[in-house]
Image (cartoon, coloured by chain):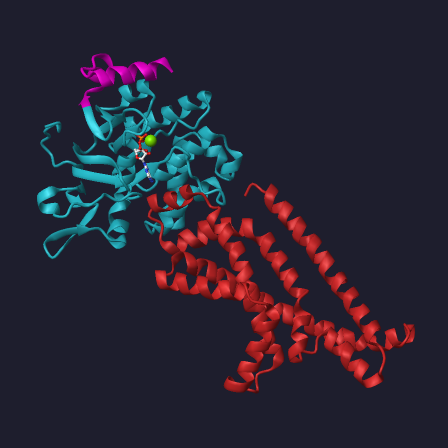
């Protein structure tokens, strides 16, 4: 093994930084999927016809209870063999990661919906409010208040799992460090170190912000 | 027959209504009529089915249907239209959601636990359904809401959230919210039971005003016997889902015939 080298550290940095930008892009795309799909699933499980509820609950239970790594490899292999080999690892990886985390966020949303007192639904019924108002004006605002912090924490957790996509060739930080190592026979340790520091630097402030948001929501009149 | 005969068509008719929760039969062929504009107070021990009657009318519960409604009844009627059922091919069948959506607009309810929407300010609690259920313009709904909030003494609180109000104030907002829908029938289920004693009078005062100044038909479940005596035309005493006795408030409160009514009133007054 090579010894730690500060010069290498400086040289490998641009590559790792490129990887970090990819991680952020994946987080953005997958996070959007996790937030929107998770919400749709939670609502679908509540208002869909019985078969929809059953299918959703089965599918997402399956996703929750199998490893992300297996899902990433499976979907990547399946799409490139049977569907479209042109699809990029970035697109497929982001989608799998987003759907995987939608299975968690949907649980947080669901808990938020279930925590709404029955009296709220009954008052809405007594006022004959149309379904889209019951959801849009009463249920979702009250649910958001309860679920936002939990969902934010899932997105932070997801951010830290982006390196999993390295196995299908998404050029995130680990892949960049290994690529550098492959070309220079040096720099992997330095690269991983930078990756760790960048993860910490990015997720710590976000986690603090999420905690703040949680406290603020708890204190507001609503 | 326990129904008073009235000249006009009844506004509400329970015709041999059954309601069970699993094995528990709460209402067993219950029949009664309520005339337009009548104020009826339902009294009786806890668990006697008073709330169930109001919730059936609000369509929050559904009757346990008879096999042949034409012969056996089991139907709730409002303004001569079936509420629990609907007509289909000349026969009465159990109402679907679309039918319920239509018929429940005539009815408003105030709950024991207020059930204001905590994410909306007071004003919007009162305008929301006016706009989105009745299709009123925002201005019209706001004018109506301000008028009603003034009536219940809460003009100063229109911009507050429910969590910033006392229980009594919240309940008065809930009354304004129900009245804003111009219901023909107002259901009041123990609306002061969750309140601290010093807040009860204000809420009852508002309801007295409403009773004096409108012709809304009211079904009232309450333990406030003074209030019941003042505002109602008729008192029905329930026990185990049956009407034990009914009559004018003076009769029932001063001179009850049935032992069960006497015992119940003694117990309530002793509280
Ligand atoms: N959703 C329900 N499920 C099961 N039992 C119920 C339900 N609602 C009411 N009951 C039962 O029905 C009976 C009548 O209740 P209720 O109408 O609330 O009486 P009251 O309002 O006169 O106290 C009680 O025995 C109560 O336990
Ligand atoms: Mg009750």
Locate ligand 1 by image quadrant.
Answer: top left
Q: Is residue B150 above or below residue B69?
A: above
Residue B266 within the segment the image draws in magenta: yes
Q: Nearer the viewer, residue A133 or B251?
A: B251
Q: Residue shown at 19%/48% (left/top)?
A: B85
Left or right side of B194 for A69: right
Say how many tags the image has: 0
Rendering quarter of residue A46: bottom left
The quarter in which the N terminus of chain A is drawn is: bottom right
- Chain A: its colour in the image is red
Q: Residue shown at 38%/60% (left/top)?
A: A48
Residue B132 point in image, percent of width and height = 37, 51
Residue B137 point in image, percent of width and height = 37, 50
Residue A12 point in image, percent of width and height = 83, 77
Residue B259 point in image, percent of width and height = 21, 15
Q: Main secondary structure of the magenta part?
A: helix
**The residue stretch that appears in magenta:** B245-271
Left or right side of A150 for B181: left
The quarter in which the C terminus of chain A is drawn is: top right
Q: Is residue B48 above or below residue A166?
A: above
- Chain B: its colour in the image is cyan
Q: Residue shown at 65%/74% (left/top)?
A: A165
Q: Is residue A138 above or below residue A48?
A: above
């Amino acid at each position: 093994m090579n010894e730690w080298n500060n010069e290498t550290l400086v040289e490998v940095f641009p590559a790792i930084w490129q990887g970090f930008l990819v991680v952020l892009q994946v987080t953005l795309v997958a996070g959007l999927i996790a937030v929107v799909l998770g919400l749709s699933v939670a609502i679908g499980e509540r208002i869909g016809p019985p078969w929809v509820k059953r299918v959703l609950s089965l599918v997402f239970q399956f996703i929750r209870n199998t490893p992300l790594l297996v899902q990433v490899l499976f979907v990547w292999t399946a799409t490139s063999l049977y569907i479209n080999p042109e699809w990029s690892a970035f697109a497929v990886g982001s989608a799998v990661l987003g759907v995987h985390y939608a299975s968690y966020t949907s649980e947080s949303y669901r808990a938020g919906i279930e925590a709404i007192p029955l009296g709220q639904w009954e008052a809405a019924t007594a006022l004959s409010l149309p379904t889209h108002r019951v959801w849009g004006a009463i249920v979702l605002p009250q649910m958001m208040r309860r679920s936002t912090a939990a969902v934010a924490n899932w997105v932070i957790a997801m951010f830290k799992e982006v390196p999993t996509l390295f196995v299908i060739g998404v050029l995130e930080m680990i892949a960049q460090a290994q690529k550098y190592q492959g070309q220079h026979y040096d720099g992997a340790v330095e690269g991983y170190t930078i990756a760790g520091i960048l993860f910490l630097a990015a997720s710590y402030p976000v986690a603090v912000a999420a905690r703040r948001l949680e406290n603020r929501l708890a204190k507001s009149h609503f | 027959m326990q129904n008073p005969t009235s000249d006009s068509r009844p506004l509400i008719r329970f015709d041999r209504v059954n309601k069970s929760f699993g094995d528990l039969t709460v209402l067993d062929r219950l029949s009664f009529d309520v005339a337009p504009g009548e104020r009826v107070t339902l009294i009786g021990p806890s668990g006697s089915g008073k709330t169930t009657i109001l919730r059936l009318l609000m369509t929050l519960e559904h009757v346990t249907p008879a096999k042949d409604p034409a012969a056996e009844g089991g139907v709730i009627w409002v303004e001569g239209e079936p509420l629990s059922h609907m007509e289909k091919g000349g026969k009465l069948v159990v109402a679907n959601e679309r039918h319920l959506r239509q018929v429940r607009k005539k009815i408003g309810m105030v709950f024991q636990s207020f059930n204001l929407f905590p994410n909306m300010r007071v004003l919007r609690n009162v305008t929301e359904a006016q706009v989105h259920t009745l299709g009123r313009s925002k201005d019209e709904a706001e004018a109506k809401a301000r008028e009603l909030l003034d009536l219940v003494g809460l003009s100063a609180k229109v911009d507050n959230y429910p969590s910033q109000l006392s229980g009594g104030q919240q309940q008065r907002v809930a009354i304004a919210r129900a009245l804003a829908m111009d219901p023909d029938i107002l259901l009041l289920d123990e609306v002061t039971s969750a309140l601290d004693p010093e807040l009860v009078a204000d809420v009852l005062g508002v309801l007295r005003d409403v009773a004096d100044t409108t012709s809304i038909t009211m079904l009232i479940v309450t333990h406030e016997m003074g209030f019941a005596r003042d505002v109602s035309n008729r008192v029905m005493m329930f026990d185990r889902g049956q009407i034990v006795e009914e009559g004018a408030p003076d009769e029932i409160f001063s001179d009850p015939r049935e032992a069960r009514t006497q015992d119940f009133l003694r117990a309530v007054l002793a509280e």
